[in-house]
Image: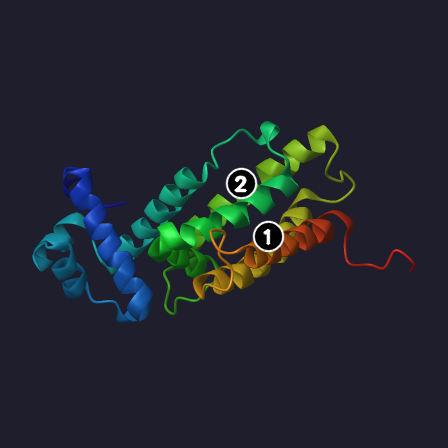
Amino acid sequence: MPKATFYNLKEEKQERILRSAIAEFNAHGFAGANVAAIAKNAEVAKGSMYQYFKDKTELFVHCVAWATGILMEKAGQQAAFENTDIFDYFSKDIAMRIKLVHEERELTLFTQDVFLGKFRAMPEAATAEMTHVADEYVLGHIRAGRAKGSIRSDIDEGLLKLFLVGATMRIKEHVLKEAEESILDLTGDKATVEKFGSILEDMIDLLKNGMGSKEA
């Protein structure tokens, strides 16, 4: 948790510091990120950074929590579980992430890389923060799906969670990479939109029906 002095700042200044930090972490990783550079780009004194955060680890962990919250808010992921089909959620989640790649590129790529463990020397607290948020959200969808009869009840919910997170994360990583390279763009021409839609349809079909041949 940041120190009280950080929360005493105007929200605009808080955001400027966090966005500067995320840009620095994206560019140089956790170990290579420089607090002085973060302060300079945020237009605050280097010494002030240590009045706001105990150390770089605390800053990094707060960046993870803040960026995750901003993206979830923009994606509208606070909707009640009982009102959302889990398969529809994953489809819309990827579509929204594509949109956010363009609107919030630094935040989207930062949280994605944190979750995939791409930051070397990343604090364990940051991994725990992301994992906890993801696990609770997926479990909420699984339980709601079971109540509605759309999710199997004969398999342990922990195993279902591992399957869903593992299966969708690599697909999201693949689609986000293509979106970042502008191969897929929801605002682009008809062909790229159709390609994106085809990937989503295949993903949802795999989640619902598995990869085993129906003739087997």
Q: Element at badge 1? A: helix
Image quadrant in which you'd find residue 43: bottom left
> Is 183 placed above or below 200 here?
below
In the image, what residue occupies the spot 61% across and 54% down?
A: 194
- Looking at this view, is 135 or 191 the one in front? 191
- Circle 1 residues within 10 Å: few <14, some 14–19, many ≥20: some
In the image, what residue occupies the spot 55% across and 43% down?
A: 92
Residue denoted by label 1: 165
**Image x and y of residue 181, in percent:** 45, 66
**Image x and y of residue 27, in percent:** 30, 68
* Separation of marks 2 and 1 at Cα, in angstroms: 11 Å
Looking at the image, do the residues carrying marks 2 and 1 touch, with CB atoms under 8 Å apart? no
> Is 129 placed above or below 191 here?
above
Q: Element at badge 2? A: helix
In the image, what residue occupies the spot 53% across and 40% down?
A: 137
Residue denoted by label 2: 137
- Circle 2 residues within 10 Å: few <14, some 14–19, many ≥20: some
> Is 111 placed above or below 136 here?
below
